[in-house]
Structure formats: C-alpha cells, structure tokens
Amino acid sequence: MAKPRLKPMKILMVGSEIFPLIKTGGLADVMGALPAALSAIGLKVTTLIPGYPAVLAALARSDIVHHYPNLFGAEATLRAGRVDRLDLLVLDAPHLFARPGNPYLDPTGQDWPDNAQRFAALSRVAADLGLGLVPSLTPDIIHAHDWQAGLVPVYLHQASKPAPKIVMTVHNLAYQGQFPADLLGLLGLPPSSFSIAGVEHYGAIGFLKAGLQHADAITTVSPSYAAEIATPEGGMGLDGLFRARADRVLGILNGLDTDIWNPATDQALAAPFDAEHLALRAANKSMLARATGLDERSDALLFGLISRFTWQKGIDLILAAIETIITINGQLVVLGTGEPALENALREASSAHPGAIKAIIGFDEGLAHLIQGGADALLVPSRFEPCGLTQLAAQRYGAVPIVTRVGGLADTVIDANDAALSTQAATGIQFQPATEDGLRRALHRSARLFHDPPTWQMIQRNAMRLDVSWAGPARHYAALYRSLRPS
C-alpha cells in the first residue's frame, strides 16, 4: 500500500521589511530570499509584512482574508496576495503604515513615536494567525524576525489554547525595540508580564528581549555571532539571557540570493563573467571608474565599500586610512548613507582626492552590483557583524573581501595567511582587532597580494566557487522546524 502523501509543513514568516519591496538592510534580503529556498525543499511559506505604500503598490491583486474593526486605534484589513516568488499576507493598516520613506523613521530621522503600537500590531496579527484566525492559513511554525516581531511569542504565551512553535531570529542585537513601561496596557500586555521573566528589560518594555524569553528556539545569523552575544562584550545587555537559554540558541549562516547576485548574468555589469573568465572584470572596473568619476587606472588597487555609515561598520576606520589607500596606489569608491557626520567626512575625502576617492551618498542597486563586479577588493571593517551579506556578494563577484575577524565575517571568509595560501584555500583577508592600525596592515597586505596576479586570481577563483546560496541554510532551518514539530 502506498504511503499517504504528507502535507507540506506550513511556515509563517513575520518581519518588518522584505526585498525587493521595502529595504533598509540585510533583514529585507533574508525575508525576500529564505522563503523561496524553503519552498524549493517542500515547505509552504507565507510571509506577513506591514502594508507600507510600496508594498501595497506592488500587490496588484489581493484578497481580504480578515477585517479588524479596531487594531491599535483604527480599522485594518489583512490581505493575501503574491508578488514574484513571495506568498504574502499584508497588514493594511493606514493609521500605522501609510507613511512614505523609511519604515521606522520620520522625515526628520527620528523614530516614529508610535513604533511600539505599529509593530505590536504586526505581532498581534501573527499571533492571531497562529491561533487560527484564518483556518486555511494556520501555520505549523511561526518564524519571527528581529524586535519588530518580538511580541509574537508573548501574545501566543498569553493564549489559552494550543499555539504553534516559535523560532525567533536575531539579525542585529544592536536594535532591540525598547519602549516606555506605561505602554503596557495599550499594547495588550497584562501587568504580570512586566517582570524579568517577561517583557521587562532595564525598566522598559523590551520587544526583542520578550521574544527571546518566550521563543521555542532562537537563531542568529552566524555561529560566531551566536557565541559573541553570550558574552558581556557582545551581548548588549542580553548576554545573561542567551547563556540561560543556550540550549535553545543556534547560529545559522545567512545565504545570498544567487539568482539576483550572479556575475554571469548580471545586467548591471559591462561584461558578465565567471571564475574561468576573470579577465572580463577589467571592463567592469573601467565602467565603474567612468560611472563614479574615478580615474581609469588598471594598475590601481580599487577598493569598494557598500554600507550603512555607522560606528558599527567601521566607517571612521576607513576615513583614517584614506592616506594609506593613496600611498599604496589605491582608489576607493563608497556607496551608502548613514550618520550625517560620516557622510560629510566622506564627501570631504572625495573632494580632497579627486580621481582617487569617490563617495556616493545614497543607494543605487545597479551601482552596488557594479561595485561588486568592478572593484578589486571590498572593505568590510565592521566592529561587530552578525553575518553580513556584502562579503558574500563580493566573493561571488571576485572582489576580494577585506574583513574584520568578527561574527559572520569570520565564518564566511578564509584569511589569506601562509597556510591558506599554501593549500590554495584563501578567499579573502581578515584582520583583528578593528582598529586603524589593523586596517592599515590589512590594506598593505592586500596591496602585496594584488601585485602578485597569480595569487590574487587564485583567491578570487576560490571565493567565486564557494556555495553562498540559501540551499544549505534552508536545510538547517527546515531541520530546526521539524525538531520543534516532530511528525
């Protein structure tokens, strides 16, 4: 007798941004790519996201699956639809999300004053779905991402009926979602929840802390980051919780969407290429110089940087190393936005070194691809880095990553030390500590390697042949889901 076909496990992803609809960082890339990778191995994934204007504009057709007469102050509807490869549930709540621009900040760059209510609403709807709000969409597992979905486990914990298991993923512990304690009642949280075993965190309501406290499993986006956040130095006030729940914490590396990030088919490049045709990168280097106003110099070591401009990302270290870049016959092209003081300092460096240093303040997806395909090396001098995706793209595109030995950077880049070079295993350059001197030494080391073309090309080919796709991480997540819900 044939075995009955098992229904695919149903996963509800919950997060606050998703590529290509709305993006401020790597969370969006994960939310956009992981569901497709999970679907490819037989799981059924639906993603719940807020109904920002850009999301609703992309949702050309949708079905209303639930109506809330009052969700944190006004009516809201839950819409189901599909955009590209993504099955979406969109929380259409104009009073909370009908705001242009950055999903978290007002036009002055400050947090929206009602962010607690906005993302509590997202969590509330996710919990309702877990409790059978729409029977056909009831998930087996809810996978909540970052502080914006941190109250999902809390609301389910309060329920009086069976609920699905919850996986909570920390993408960046620097962002925890802390709000005043007097919002407790407004958020639908009972007074009893305001305790160290509940939502209380240093006298405030901690969305991320609450989610970590109540989740059935906790993941971070690299094994090294999972170890770092259990230390006082890396735990940002939550290290004790991570140590207490160590048996529930798992580090799973992020992947990269290798359909979008494919140098052999990338239309943003002047000359698509692969690991066997590295000479074609020269045309991309020339195009990058022309597009950004750099001098066209094939002999110069061209560094790229694609980043948010923050202390975490080590932008101040790069500013301090500008003269070193000039000294080693280097060039630098920078793309990103961030803290105004760092933006201004990068503009000044660009003005002081025309033809050698260029800062593009803003973000352009096509230019990001061209930097990866045309720069000789990519700088990622982060002081801490949960995983990082830019170094994965760099390796795939043959831009040798120069990274600090922290978090996911340590896990994804093999340093070109003597042992790795002798065994032809190197895929980049690591340095430690994250200091000006550390970066300068790494820049000098990169220059020596660059002027040894056979060795440099060996590093490039090693990196390009790595599997940085979501296939492996997706299998790890699927195994975790199954361990929480044994068949």
Image: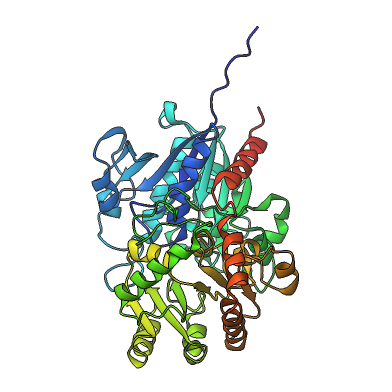
Does 282 appear above or below 463?
A: below
**Which residue corresponds to the image point at 43% horizontal and 80% vertical from the top-left?**
332
Q: Position of residue 276 (x, y in %)?
A: 53, 56
Q: In which quarter of the image is the C terminus?
A: top right
Does 255 appear above or below 313?
A: above
- Is residue 115 rendered to the left or right of residue 377? left
* Most distant residue in the top direction: 1
Q: Where is residue 243 in the image (x, y as percent from the top left)?
A: 71, 60
Q: Can residue 209 be seen in this view?
A: yes
**Which residue corresponds to the image point at 64% horizontal and 66% vertical from the top-left?**
410
- Is residue 261 rendered to the left or right of residue 430? left
Depth check: 428 or 225 in front? 428
Depth check: 34 or 487 in front? 34
**Which residue corresponds to the image point at 47% horizontal and 63% vertical from the top-left?**
177
Q: In which quarter of the image is the N terminus?
A: top right
Q: Position of residue 89 (x, y in %)?
A: 37, 39
Does 335 appear above or below 251?
A: below
Rendering quarter of residue 114: bottom left
Q: Is residue 186 visible?
A: no
**Which residue corresponds to the image point at 56% horizontal and 36% vertical from the top-left?**
164
- Is residue 232 rendered to the left or right of residue 61? right
Depth check: 486 or 399 in front? 399
Across the whole image, how many numbered discs are drawn on residues? 0
